[in-house]
Amino acid sequence: MESTRTWEHQMLINELTQGMEKAKQLRFHLCMTSPSKAQDLLLQKILSSYEKALLILKGSRSTGQVQLAAPTSGAPESSISVDGSPRSDELNKNSREHQEHRETSKKRKMLPTWTEQVSVASENGFEGPTDDGYSWRKYGQKDILGAKYPRSYYRCTYRHVQNCWAAKQVQRSDDDPTIFEITYKGTHTCTQSNNAVPPPASPEKQELNYKLQQQNQMLFDLRAKLKVDTEGLENKEIQPHLSFPSTFASVNFENHIFPTSAVADDSHFGANSHLIGSPALSESNYFSASSTYQMKRFRGAHNLQHSESDIAEIISGHASTTNSPIGGMEFPIDPVELDPNFPFNIQGFFT
DNA sequence: GATATTTGACCTTC
DNA sequence: GAAGGTCAAATATC
């Protein structure tokens, strides 16, 4: 069992690391340029990586001996499946539908959720950023309190055919009607998505990808220069900049006693620099600075924290110890292959 | 006729 | 009780 968890943790960290790399690039991009579509593309990649990581976690819960049951198995899960909601089932004329609905609610609660803001080009009109490679079916629209525009609700067209529970909400920004805030809930399990990787990019996106590659190359070059500039820094100068702005991170900072000398040790720092930008810090450190383009969070991660608190601890622990902005501007350091045993080295690493 | 959208009503959550 | 979320009948479109 332990080996299974080890493997899952490795997979998780692999995915999060990918997202982290993208986050680093985006952060750098934000520092260097004004918001652009390239950032949009990067954020989507980040989301994709995080999404995969969450799927791995979900899989570990449904197939392993972890306590939470798979949502579709009908196995009891907490109090809900025992006695239902405060409303009694007898009051419902159609108990079966009601039960299905409750199961749906349970599924929804467990679905990973994240939000991204998409700017709609003028040629797309105001139909919304619906062309994300998936087939959606609108099932509702609601006026939201305080919002100028109604919120639209979409779910996967193949929900009933292929039991795909992906859904999204589209809300036009009050400030900028060309910006749509899309909240995705769950991932596609239908065959249209296969592995939830976005479909081949349109020519426009391919061009963006090409530009992005060029920008990344520039960033790598710049990164090398910056690395040289910082190699001479004394550890003592780094330490005062260590901060833990994320509550999530700070909790774990309490759980782990981190000798600052170890944290600031250049070799350790470099060897684990690939952990900079862990999703635990993404919200507070990397994206909150942008008012026009935010990747908010995986709200589903809150659910995961209960059953996978150890993983979350590890992740946030990484975030805590690697969150060491130098001069308020972090920069990626040479990528390092992930140590397969990394999640379990972390304790010894910091002691 | 099949499929998608609209929209009022209902349900859930806080 | 209010607000958000979803359902499902009515309607529109192809």
Image (spheres, coloured by chain):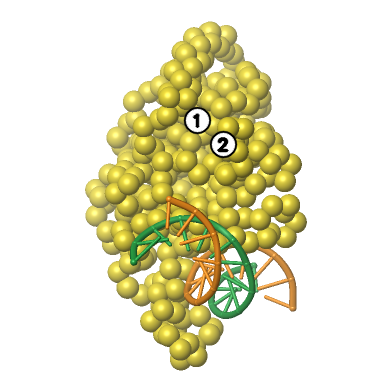
Chain colours: A yellow, B green, C orange
Mark 2 / mark 1, whichever is N-terminal: 1
Please tell me which residue lies in front, A71 or A150. A150
Q: Quadrant of residue A53?
A: top left
A67 left or right of A98? left
In this rendered view, identify the residue nearer to me: A310 or A145.
A145
Helix, strand or loop status at disc 2: helix
Task: Quickly name the residue at label 2.
Answer: A124
Residue drawn at x 57%, y 9% is A229
Position of residue B11 measured from the top left corner of the image (x, y, whole percent): 54, 78
Image quadrant containing the C terminus of chain A: top left
The residue lying at 41 percent from left, 46 percent from top is A134
Which residue is label 1 attached to? A41
- Of residue A210 and residue A291, the one placed in the foreground of this image is A210
Q: Is residue A198 above or below residue A58?
A: above
Mark 1 Cα shell of 10 Å, populated few (<14), some (14-19), many (≥20) = some
Q: Residue at x 40, y 74 (%)?
A: A100
Q: Where is A32 relative to A250, above or below?
A: above
Cα gap from disc 2 to disc 1, whole angstroms:
17 Å
